[in-house]
Amino acid sequence: MRTTAVRGSLAPLLLLWGLTRAALLLCVLKVIVFPGPDVTSDVSVIYRGWYDVLRTGTFPLDDVTWQYPPAAALAILSPGLLPFLEYATAFFVLACLADLVTLCLLLYAGRRPGRSPRGAWVWVVGVPLLGPTVYARYDVMVTAVAVAALLAAARYPRLAGALAGFGALVKVWPALLLLAVRRRGAWVSAAVTGAGVAGLFAVLMPGAFAFLAFQRDRGTEVESLGALVFHVARHHGWEGEVLLNYGSVEFLGPYVGWVSTGALLLSGAALGWLVLWRVMAVRFSAHSVADAAFVAVLLFTTTSRVISPQYMVWLVGLGAVCLCFRESRMGVAVGLVLGASLVTVLEFPVWFAHVVASDSLGIALLVLRNGLLVAATVVAARVLWCATVPRRRSVPTVPGPARAAGTPVSS
């Protein structure tokens, strides 16, 4: 009876996954023309160019758009595993496979005691909200590694650490996954794995860490929170411009450096809050590791100089892991992230021309999307703090001489 019930509950989930992912594949393969600019050119042109360079045993040292840690080369080279397919097609198939692996991990985790299938539903619903961009970037592959690390943290901390360390060498942000992990073995495993992978690339491939200089010179991307200042300023005589810079559409001109510095200061403040939380937190539950990772990535995404659409898949994946736990109270924050994902596909690619033009529609979309992200960040951070940091109890004191037993205290 129970097996039949489980199969029955899985049927609509798997059907929805199959239909939505088929639609995504048809879009990236251009069988269905998705509105807005072509999101697949990053794979067919940029990734393919990197692929040709990486195959020679070196990183693209002369390309400032290469802004990724060394293990990202593995994602770019992965279509070589399917030599019978054209590069872009192979990449899209592997992205879909990473999507499926993530779903299987969430389904398996959701069937354990104290767990819930909510996480799998968040993933199935959340990914297609981002449109075809999610299959046209390698972030879905990184998210699969991150989801595996978080789900392994409770029972296999060393494996979780190794996955987090490897993930950090692919896209940096998985380094935040271990924030609430208290087992030393996980941290040691992450450090050893990260150092080993980094050292291997440094020895075998020249230019493994050239990306650090390229990242340093980035400006304020038009979809970021800070960019709203310039979207409004363009209507009041600001003399800057919007240009393709370092691989993304950024604002260039007066005061852009100030806003970019402000974003870095906000990220520094976010780091300070996380350190304070880690020092103050004493009540840890099974879901605390996932909740903390979700909050940390939310904080750094929202305060980033660049909030690219593909960043949202990180939040969808981490939010899905949170809701795998029945006791997690991140439901409202995850719902806000799903709402932000829906608005994201509208601002890119559907109406990206309006965003670039800073017209009323473009500004409204960014205010809504970034507002939802800010709200999700505040809500999630509050939930994490209240769940893990005990309240200070104030002991009432009565001035003057000791009171007799039973004497009421005046208000």
Image: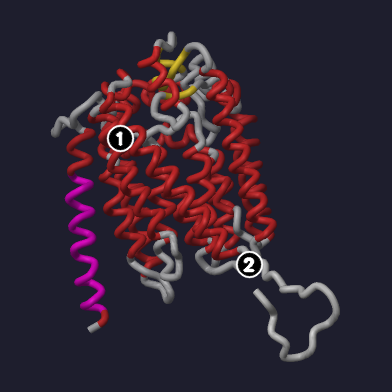
Residue 79 shows in this picture: no
**For the point 44% across and 64% down, which residue is it?**
329
Q: Which of the marked residues, 2 or 1, is nearer the chain's N terminus?
A: 1
Report which residue position mark 1 lands on: 133
Report which residue position mark 2 lands on: 390
**For the point 26% across and 21% down, which residue is it?**
353
Left/right placement of residue 67 relative to residue 277 reads left
Residue 145 horizontal/vertical position (percent): 46, 49
| Type of the residue with mark 1 | Thr
| Type of the residue with mark 2 | Pro
Q: CA distance from mark 2 to mark 1?
A: 42 Å
- Asked if labels 1 and 2 touch by Cβ distance under 8 angstroms, the answer is no
Specify whether residue 10 is painted magenta. Answer: yes
The stretch in magenta equals 3-22
Residue 267 horizontal/vertical position (percent): 58, 37
Specify whether residue 330 is painted magenta. Answer: no
Residue furthest to the right:
401
**For the point 53% across and 59% down, which residue is it?**
384
Residue 403 horizontal/vertical position (percent): 80, 84
Mark 1 Cα within 10 Å, few/some/many (few <14, many 20+)? many
Residue furthest to the top:
239
**For the point 25% across and 24% down, which residue is it?**
37
In the displayed structure, would residue 345 be above or below residue 187? Answer: above
Foreground: 284 or 233?
Answer: 233
Foreground: 388 or 248?
Answer: 388
- The mark found on residue 240 in the picture is none
Residue 203 shows in this picture: yes
Left/right placement of residue 277 relative to residue 40 reads right
Q: Which SS does the magenta portion mostly show?
A: helix
